[in-house]
């Protein structure tokens, strides 16, 4: 087998700014790579995760003009951790505003985890503006997927971590963990809100890699990050992403003709592989790679290799 591909070297943006998208929200955006080269938009996970400098390194800087942004309420966007006017469909509209700002008629859309959910929602709404679609750690936000991660399923794989996740919630409220956390995340007690946010975020940080990654877990426990991440993610999941049940798979026929790549880890805990498999059946224009020996995070070597090969191929490199 050929050598696994890795990230491109570190790079700084050539342009950045804040875009007023209305409703009191201003979103941070940046562009890196080569201005006027192949346009791509990167959609980060969470919801509420924010973009990181490492995300710039998924694309050949000589061949791509990369737009990365922090979705409403997280990262460098303001107001921090805000839930007002913050839904999937507001974000889809924000992506369109950014496309128009860049001046691209079509662009590649790349999203992982929640970013795959948002990428599918955007591409199914605006297929004429998508040149290619790359999704990783596919999440279609059905009730079954939510219950698997926040009620029963992953709890059986990580019993000691699940016990810590349950700890802030009284036993009588544990039948609906997402709602129990919501009451604390939107409550009036700042200390309780922060404690719940950290607990929510750490559960995810400790279950997204095949093998433990202490550095990643520590990133998720940072209070400033955790507050936006937990509040926004819980807000979206309690509302099922403002999607009809099964909508993204049901409407996958709208992706017809869009070249794509689906990359998913066999042992992805947050996002069961079954839904990536179903997406590959509903969208035959996409290559499907189920990566053995891999969890959820894009940093898993086998997943990263497939992602870099995909961005290279769509840039004409192979």
Image (cartoon, rainbow, N blue to C red):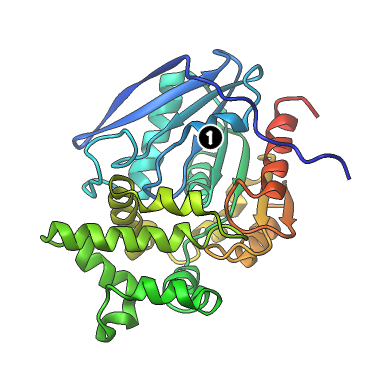
For residue 272, side relative to residue 145 (left or right): right
Q: Residue furthest right?
A: 1
Q: Residue at x 31, y 40 (%)?
A: 72
Which percent across, then down, holds residue 236? 34, 57
> In terms of secondary structure, where does tag 1 sit?
helix
Q: Nearer the viewer, residue 145 or 175?
A: 175
Q: Residue furthest front?
A: 214
Q: Residue at x 24, y 35 (%)?
A: 78
Q: Residue at x 47, y 70 (%)?
A: 149
| Quadrant containing the N terminus in the rendered view | top right
Q: Nearer the viewer, residue 94 or 51?
A: 51
Q: Is residue 243 visible?
A: no
For residue 167, side relative to residue 59 (left or right): left
For residue 22, side relative to residue 132 (left or right): left
Q: Residues within 10 Å of mark 1 (few under 14, many from 20)?
A: some
Which percent across, then down, holds residue 19? 31, 25
| Quadrant containing the C terminus in the rendered view | top right
Which percent across, then down, holds residue 201? 38, 58
Residue, disc 1: 55
Q: Residue furthest bottom?
A: 172
Residue 189: which quarter of the image? Answer: bottom left
Which percent across, then down, holds residue 55? 53, 34
Residue 18: which quarter of the image? Answer: top left
Note whether 109 is above or below 273 in the view shown: above
Q: Nearer the viewer, residue 155 or 310?
A: 155
Note whether 125 is above or below 59 in the view shown: below
Residue 243: which quarter of the image? Answer: bottom left
């Amino acid at each position: 087998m050929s050598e696994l591909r890795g990230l491109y070297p570190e790079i700084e943006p050539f342009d950045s700014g804040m875009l007023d998208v209305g409703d009191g929200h201003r979103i941070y955006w940046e562009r890196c790579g080569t201005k006027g080269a192949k346009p791509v938009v990167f959609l980060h996970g969470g919801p509420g995760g924010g973009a990181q400098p490492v995300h710039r390194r998924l694309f050949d800087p000589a061949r791509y003009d990369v737009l990365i942004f922090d979705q409403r309420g997280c990262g460098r966007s303001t107001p921090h951790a805000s839930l007002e006017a913050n839904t999937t469909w507001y974000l889809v509209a924000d992506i369109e505003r950014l496309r128009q700002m860049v001046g691209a008629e079509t662009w590649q859309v790349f999203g992982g985890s929640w970013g795959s959910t948002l990428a599918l929602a955007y591409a199914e709404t605006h297929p004429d503006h998508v040149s290619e679609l790359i999704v990783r750690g596919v999440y279609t936000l059905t009730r079954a997927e939510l219950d698997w991660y926040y009620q029963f399923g992953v709890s059986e794989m990580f019993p000691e971590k699940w016990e810590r996740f349950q700890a802030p919630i009284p036993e009588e409220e544990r039948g609906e963990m997402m709602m129990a956390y919501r009451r604390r995340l939107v409550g009036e007690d700042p200390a309780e809100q922060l404690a719940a946010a950290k607990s929510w975020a750490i559960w995810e940080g400790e279950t997204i890699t095949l093998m433990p990654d202490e550095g990643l877990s520590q990133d998720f426990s940072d209070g400033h990050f955790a507050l936006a991440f937990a509040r926004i993610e819980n807000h979206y999941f309690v509302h099922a992403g403002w999607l009809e049940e099964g909508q993204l798979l049901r409407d996958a026929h709208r992706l017809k003709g869009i070249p794509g790549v689906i990359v998913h880890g066999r042992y992805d805990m947050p996002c069961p592989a079954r839904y990536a498999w179903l997406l590959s059946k509903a969208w035959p224009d996409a290559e499907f790679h189920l990566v053995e020996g891999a969890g959820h995070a894009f940093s898993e070597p086998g997943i990263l290799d497939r992602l870099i090969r995909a961005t290279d191929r769509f840039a004409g490199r192979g």
